[in-house]
Image: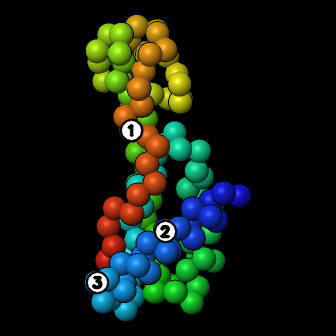
């Protein structure tokens, strides 16, 4: 389950921010998670509870904001919705689409005390 490794990275980011910004506890963590990133939100929630024990994020509420897949078609020069990585452009059917969104794993916000 790679979600545990990803969650441990998020916990490390929060701990680094706590040292840098001098806060003692994270209350809410808002995480952007791309729909095309092959990360299960439910697994992230489960892992966050386990991984945050004994850290500045223990007891924090993890909120996950899903980011839909999006890309730029090089052939028809349009921004298009993507349902899968390396999928065809829904406008022209060609496979020259550069993904521009949907692969995110980003701490968007922290509510701290």
**Callout 3 environment at 10 Å: few (<14), some (14 to 19), or many (20+)?**
few
Any part of residue 41 in sight: yes
Q: Earlier in the sequence, mark 3 or mark 2?
A: 2
C-alpha separation, residue under disc 3 versus residue under disc 2? 16 Å
Q: Can you say whether 37 is above or below 73 in the image?
A: below
Q: Position of residue 34 (x, y in %)?
A: 46, 46
Disc assigned to residue 36: none
Instruction: Name the side, left or right, on which 10 lies relative to 8.
Output: left
Could you classify mark 2 by the number of other residues whose Cα lies within 10 Å: few (under 14), some (14-19), or many (20 or more)? many
- Residue 84 location, x and y as percent? 53, 29
Q: Residue at x 28, y 84 (%)?
A: 21
User: What secondary structure is marked by label 1?
Assistant: strand
- Which residue lies under the disc numbered 2? 10
Circle 3 sits on which residue? 21
- Tell me the quarter of the picture where residue 111 sits: bottom left
Q: Quick check: 12 above or below 83?
A: below
Which mark, residue 101? 1
> Tag 1 or tag 3, which sits nearer the N-term?
3
Residue at figure coordinates x 46%, y 9% from the top left: 93
Q: Is residue 7 left or right of residue 62?
A: right
């Amino acid at each position: 389950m790679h979600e545990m490794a990803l969650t441990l990275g998020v916990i490390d980011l929060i701990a680094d921010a706590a040292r840098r910004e001098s806060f003692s506890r994270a209350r809410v963590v808002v995480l952007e998670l791309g729909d095309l990133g092959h990360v299960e939100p439910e697994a992230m929630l489960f892992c966050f509870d386990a991984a945050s024990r004994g850290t500045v994020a223990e007891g924090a509420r993890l909120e996950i904001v899903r980011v839909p897949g999006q890309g730029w078609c090089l052939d028809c020069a349009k921004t298009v919705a993507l349902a899968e990585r390396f999928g065809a452009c829904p406008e022209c059917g060609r496979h020259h689409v550069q993904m521009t969104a949907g692969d995110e794993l980003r701490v968007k916000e922290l509510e701290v005390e």
